[in-house]
Structures are given as structure tokens and as C-alpha cells.
Image: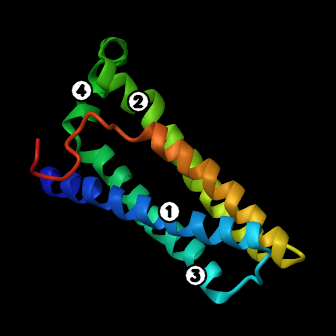
Amino acid sequence: MYAAVLGLHNLLRWVVLFLAAWALFRGYSGWMRDRPWSGLDRQAGLVFSIVFDIQILLGLFLAFISPLVQNVLVGVGAAMQAPHSRFFLIEHVPLMLLALILVHLGSSRSRNAPDDHTKHRRAAVMYTLGTLATGVAIPWWRALLPGLG
């Protein structure tokens, strides 16, 4: 079961990144072109945040069944000496949770903004920060697609 969930989590990262690009495009194009906020703009942020939620839930589930996490729980000191264990313990989880918060803030703050220009600006800025945190927190050394490494 671990391998299947890890494969799904790995594959879903590409969906999250694609949706991030879509939401960023909608935010920046609306902001720079001063175009009216539309249902498609709202939908881009909403779908991005929902799929990100699913990705986080899969990741949290992995934390309970992962052999890596089980080894960390046995000895945190030894885990801190191993770069991959330290990455997941100190960087991956906290940065992904921060990214999730930023994406949700972008979605909610843009919807509640007083005008269309501010809606697009808030979406663009918050989605950018969330996407940057995500990019830093992804373990790029792992296989880019499930089953390829």
C-alpha cells in the first residue's frame, strides 16, 4: 500500500504544479491587463487549493505508513544526520503546510477583495509565494514519475 500511495502522491505533484501554473496565469494576466475578475479566475484558485488539500492529505497519510518516518521516530538524532531524513523532517512537511496556507489565503483573500484589480493582485502574489514554497519543498531527487526510479 505504501508504494501505491507514494506513487499517487508523486504523480499528483504534477497536477498541483499544473494547477499552480493555471492559477498564476489567471492571476497575473488579470492583474497586468486589468481585466475583470471572472468565475474562471475563482475556479482556478479553488481547484488549485482543493487538489493541494488532497495532496497534503496523501502526504500526511504517508507520514503514518512510511518506513522513513518510522526510522525517524526510532532515533531523531540519527535521522538528523541523514540528509534525506532531515529534509522530510525539517523542510518538506513544514514548507508544504506553509504553501497550503498561502494558497488558501490567496484563494480567500482574492475573493474578498474590494475590486477586480486587487483580487487579481492578491491571487497572483499569494499563489506565487505558495508555489515557491512548494518548489523548494519538493524532493526533486526522487523519480519524476512513479515507476521511473
Residue drawn at (45%, 39%) of the image: 137
Whichever of labels 3 and 1 marks the residue nearer the N terminus, that label is 1
Whichever of labels 2 and 1 marks the residue nearer the N terminus, that label is 1
Tell which residue pokes out farthest to the front in this image. Answer: 33
At mark 3, the secondary structure is: helix
Using the image as rendered, state which of residue 77 and residue 34 is in the foreground.
Answer: 34
Badge 1 crowding class, 10 Å Cα cut-off, few under 14, some 14 to 19, many 20 or more, is: some
The disc label shown at residue 89, or none: 2
Mark nearer the viewer, 1 or 4: 1
Query: Which residue does the numbered mark 1 point to in the structure image?
Result: 21
Residue 22 location in percent, x, y? 51, 69
Residue drawn at (71%, 73%) of the image: 30
In the image: residue 72, left or right of residue 124: left
Query: Which residue does the numbered mark 3 point to in the structure image?
Result: 43
Whichever of labels 4 and 2 marks the residue nearer the N terminus, that label is 4
Whichever of labels 1 and 4 marks the residue nearer the N terminus, that label is 1
Whichever of labels 4 and 3 marks the residue nearer the N terminus, that label is 3
- Is 10 above or below relative to 68? below
Mark nearer the viewer, 4 or 2: 2
At mark 2, the secondary structure is: helix
Disc 3 from disc 1: Cα separation: 13 Å
